Image (tube, rainbow, N blue to C red):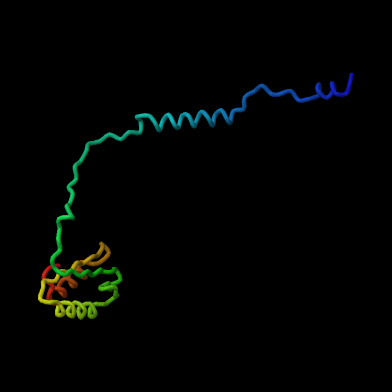
Amino acid sequence: MPRANRQILNAPVPSRTIEGAPVLTIFFLFLGVLFLRSQFFTAYGISIDLPTAETSTMRVTHPTSSVVLLDSGYFLFQENIMDDNELAAALERLSTSSDGAERVLRIYCDRRVPMETFLRVATTAKRAGFSSI
């Protein structure tokens, strides 16, 4: 028998079995797409109409200043970190330098700031001449 024919006879026979991993991968991808497109994941509930604020109509006609109460006990006012005495002096200077117009002070804080600190700053602002806090 010629040498070429022997090599053909010794060649491996292709397997006719189907590999399981690619078939399972395609099956689970199809199953995932089917679940995501189904009504199974639709959340049903009641609709709630929440109130909305119309901020565009709110006009601030008075000069406004802001103070941020930090949980460390200090205050952020006019881009400076201050303690109680410095804040009181700064609020006093600001209220006396105004042209007689009403002054408004906005106080910002979070729940970590004690309520006593908030009340102390509000009282200091009232004493300094701020009309609205």
Q: Where is residue 39 in the image (x, y as percent from the top left)?
A: 34, 29
Q: Tell me the residue at 78%/25% (across/down).
A: 11
Q: Tell me the residue at 69%/23% (across/down).
A: 15
Quadrant (top left/top right/bottom left/bottom right) for the N terminus: top right
Q: Which of 105 and 59 is in front in this view?
A: 59
Q: Nearer the viewer, residue 59 or 123?
A: 59
Instruction: Check the image and name the residue furthest to the right.
Output: 1
Instruction: Check the image and name the residue furthest to the top.
Output: 1
Q: Position of residue 71 (x, y in %)?
A: 29, 68
Q: Position of residue 30 (x, y in %)?
A: 48, 29
Q: Tell me the residue at 66%/21% (across/down).
A: 16
**Which image quarter: residue 73?**
bottom left
**Which image quarter: residue 133?**
bottom left
Q: Along the horizontal axis of the image, is 57 left or right of 21?
A: left
Q: How many numbered tags mark residues here? A: 0
Q: Where is residue 113 in the image (x, y as percent from the top left)?
A: 25, 66
Whether residue 75 is visible to the viewer of this picture, yes or no, is no
Q: Along the horizontal axis of the image, is 11 left or right of 102?
A: right
Q: Along the horizontal axis of the image, is 48 left or right of 32?
A: left
Q: Tell me the residue at 54%/32% (across/down).
A: 25
Decide: is 15 above or below 32.
above
**Which image quarter: residue 86?**
bottom left
Whether residue 107 is visible to the viewer of this picture, yes or no, is yes
Decide: is 12 above or below 45.
above
Q: Along the horizontal axis of the image, is 18 left or right of 94?
A: right
